[in-house]
Image (cartoon, grey):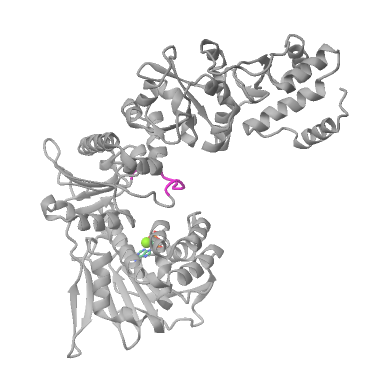
């Protein structure tokens, strides 16, 4: 038997939730009313996780071994209006109760709160799963939750009690063996969850794939009660493909990925040969909410041995394929495989290789089939796939073949092959421009000369885009070059339309500006690549300014490299300045404003914004004579 000394006695120690937990509780309780049944999925999943963890820990610490026939037990009691879930898992110490149930270790909570408030009701349950705030969903149905837990390997139990209103209490408790009980004191309007038919159907819906038995106590007509295992717990992937319906695949995907969308691709195969394994993998149909914020870039494909869950940290595919979800199961490893062994065994190396090969092939096939489905897949995960262009030398060229890019050609996506097919006869280079977002890129002055000459430019706005073009270097012998550094290339190509206006005489203006700007620029020169703008900034012998910005934002230290200021000799502003210099008037104030204008246009921060504002005000008032 287990139990607390009656709760809230003086021995109980009162604690407050961290502020974030408080907020979250409010949100979960108040915005998820219609989806309340998922509390059971969350609690059962936690119990199953705890049993998995204990089994894995016991491999290295035999004292933690699971009891015979470990299970998850659910006992409804209509008389006391309680629902109790018990498991034989790893359990929690007093400190762990505080850490796991009293605070939120991860940072996504606020974001979660905002998403939740704005999400459509039908999207809300999936949010809960994705952000792992599962335990608190208990407060949707209970106005008081009591947790009694005994950590495996210890002989004391602790209790945690809360009414979900800002505070919880800790105390000591008894429990005969390791594991956790969660006792829900049901709200008056949630007693439906004490009906066994209701519980059974929820478990069948949400927890059928849990591999440990979920045992429900059912009261019979005669007042007797009976324990029944309600989940199937069969390893779906071990069944022949022909026996599995699309609906079952989908349910399994949602279970294993904790997702709510339809999978885009389902891959189910059995590999035979030197290493035998079965894999059931999915490409998600939607991008998980916190996908890009996840601190881990590693794959979470589940590794099973002889149907037993071992770990989701076996890195079964390279990081750029981390969107792939699912299960790989092999008989070629021992059930008591240790962490060390997982790192060194050639069996796993072979499985990794084969799984990766199959996934890459599927990606290629999907890309070839194309269509809206692939485009939306690419919009969801392309930015992760492109990481492979940078860090996976083995697959880099293959990825380049199917990758999709925005370009100046049209509003859709293009492949590199299509880009090449549209290249000018004398063009040898794949031009690209990196920037913060697509709209800014489309409007960039850097593109003017390329547009005027009908040269297509790839528009790259994902963070990873600042890294891969250098690494990939070329595709089908065409070298990648940033337009921000390709000023010399344009002279080779004729402009498609008449250039506007007479060019100014630049011979005196350029030295005057150089003189005025000094160290702030590396050079000042005339350019043919502007058609509408007066000035543009470029770099020489270093990364593009946009790339430097992205790199600094991602925390890298970079030496400041002064930019090159390029001038459009046909622009009225430049012509006016050239006239001033001809007449022997000063341009030093103008020079600084010109450089700042170029910075603003480029999205660069101004070194002295108020100085810029002052100078501009004076200039607009027509009072400059510097
Ligand atoms: P998540 O499961 O995503 O981590 P939860 O809110 O569901 O988030 O649970 C928080 C943590 O509480 C879990 O990570 C786990 O450490 C602990 N926990 C919850 N339920 C149990 C349980 N039945 N046995 C052991 N630990 C548990
Ligand atoms: Mg959970």
Q: In which quarter of the image is the N terminus?
A: bottom left
* Count of labels in the image: 0
Q: Is residue 153 above or below residue 433?
A: below
On the rendering, which quadrant does ligand 2 occupy?
A: bottom left
Residue nearest the viewer, comparing 95 with 612? 612
Q: Nearer the viewer, residue 577 or 501?
A: 501
The residue that appears at 78% across and 20% down in the rendered structure is 576
Residue 140 position within the rendered picture, expressed as x and y whole percent measured from the top left: 42, 73
Check the picture and name the quadrant holding the C terminus.
Answer: top right
Q: Which of 312 and 198 is in front in this view?
A: 198
Residue found farthest to the front: 498
Q: Judge left or right: residue 221 versus residue 98.
A: left
Residues drawn in magenta? 291-299
From the top left corner, tell me how far across and down residue 151 is, in percent.
35, 65
Chief SS of the magenta region? loop
Q: Is residue 619 left or right of residue 156?
A: right
Indicate the position of residue 339 as horizontal and vertical percent values: 29, 45
Whether the magenta-drawn stretch holds residue 359 is answered as: no
Answer above or below: position of 526 versus 101.
above
Asked whether 298 falls inside the magenta stretch, the response is yes
**Relative to 470, does residue 502 appear above or below in the rendering?**
above
Where is residue 178 shown, x and y percent of the image?
A: 30, 68
Q: Toward the viewer: 407 or 468? A: 407
Left or right? Give the position of 156 relative to 169. left
């Amino acid at each position: 038997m287990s139990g607390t000394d009656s709760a809230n006695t003086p021995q109980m120690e009162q604690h407050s939730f961290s502020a974030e937990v408080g907020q979250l509780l409010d949100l979960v309780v108040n915005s998820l009313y219609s989806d309340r049944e998922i509390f059971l999925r969350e609690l059962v999943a936690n119990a199953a996780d705890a049993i998995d963890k204990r089994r894995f820990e016991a491999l290295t610490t035999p004292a933690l071994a699971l009891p015979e026939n470990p299970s998850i037990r659910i006992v409804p009691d209509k008389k006391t209006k309680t629902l109790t879930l018990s498991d034989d898992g790893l359990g929690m110490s007093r400190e762990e109760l505080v850490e796991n149930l009293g605070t939120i270790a991860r940072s996504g909570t606020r974001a979660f709160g905002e998403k939740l408030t704005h999400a459509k009701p039908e999207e809300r349950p999936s949010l809960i799963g994705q952000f792992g705030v599962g335990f608190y969903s208990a407060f949707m149905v209970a106005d008081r939750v009591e947790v009694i837990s005994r950590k495996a390997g210890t002989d004391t139990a602790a209790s945690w009690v809360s009414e979900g209103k800002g505070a919880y209490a800790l105390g000591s408790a008894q429990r005969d063996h390791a594991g956790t009980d969660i006792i829900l004191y049901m709200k008056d309007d949630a007693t439906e969850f004490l009906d066994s038919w209701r519980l059974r159907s929820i478990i069948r819906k949400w927890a059928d794939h849990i591999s440990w038995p979920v045992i429900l106590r059912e009261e019979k007509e005669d007042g007797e009660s009976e324990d029944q295992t309600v989940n199937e717990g069969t390893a779906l992937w071990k069944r022949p493909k022909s026996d599995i319906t699309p609906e079952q695949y989908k349910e399994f995907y949602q279970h294993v990925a904790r997702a709510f969308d339809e999978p885009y691709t389902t891959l189910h195969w059995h590999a035979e040969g030197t290493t035998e394994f079965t894999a059931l993998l999915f490409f998600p149909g939607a991008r998980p909410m916190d996908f890009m914020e996840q601190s881990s870039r590693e794959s979470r494909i589940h590794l099973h041995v002889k149907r037993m869950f071992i770990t989701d940290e076996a890195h079964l595919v390279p990081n750029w394929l981390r969107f792939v979800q699912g299960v790989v199961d092999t008989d070629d490893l021992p059930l008591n495989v240790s962490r060390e062994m997982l790192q060194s065994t050639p069996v796993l190396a072979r499985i990794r290789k084969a799984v990766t090969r199959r996934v890459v092939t599927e990606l290629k096939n999907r890309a070839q089939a194309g269509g809206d489905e692939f485009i939306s897949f690419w919009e969801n995960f392309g930015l992760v796939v492109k990481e492979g262009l940078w860090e996976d030398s083995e697959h880099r060229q293959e990825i380049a073949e199917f990758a999709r890019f925005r370009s100046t050609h049209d509003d859709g996506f293009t492949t590199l092959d299509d880009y090449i097919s549209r290249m000018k006869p004398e063009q040898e280079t794949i031009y690209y421009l990196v920037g913060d977002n697509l709209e800014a890129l489309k409007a960039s002055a850097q593109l003017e000369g390329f547009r005027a000459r009908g040269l297509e430019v790839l528009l790259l706005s994902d963070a990873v885009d600042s890294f891969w073009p250098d690494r990939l270097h070329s595709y089908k012998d065409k070298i990648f070059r940033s337009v921000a550094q390709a000023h010399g290339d344009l002279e080779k190509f004729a402009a498609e339309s008449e250039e506007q206006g007479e060019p100014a005489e630049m011979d005196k203006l350029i030295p005057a500006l150089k003189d005025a700007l000094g160290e702030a620029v590396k050079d000042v020169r005339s350019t043919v690549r502007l058609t509408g703008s007066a000035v543009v900034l470029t770099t020489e012998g270093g990364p593009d300014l946009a790339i430097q910005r992205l790199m600094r934002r991602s925390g890298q230290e970079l030496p400041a490299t002064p930019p090159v200021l390029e001038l459009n000799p046909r622009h009225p502003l430049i012509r006016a300045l050239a006239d001033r210099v001809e007449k022997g008037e000063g341009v030093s104030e103008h020079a600084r404003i010109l450089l700042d204008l170029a910075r603003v246009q480029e999205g660069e921060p101004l070194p002295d914004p108020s100085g810029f504002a002052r100078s501009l005000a004076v200039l607009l008032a027509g009072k400059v004579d510097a």
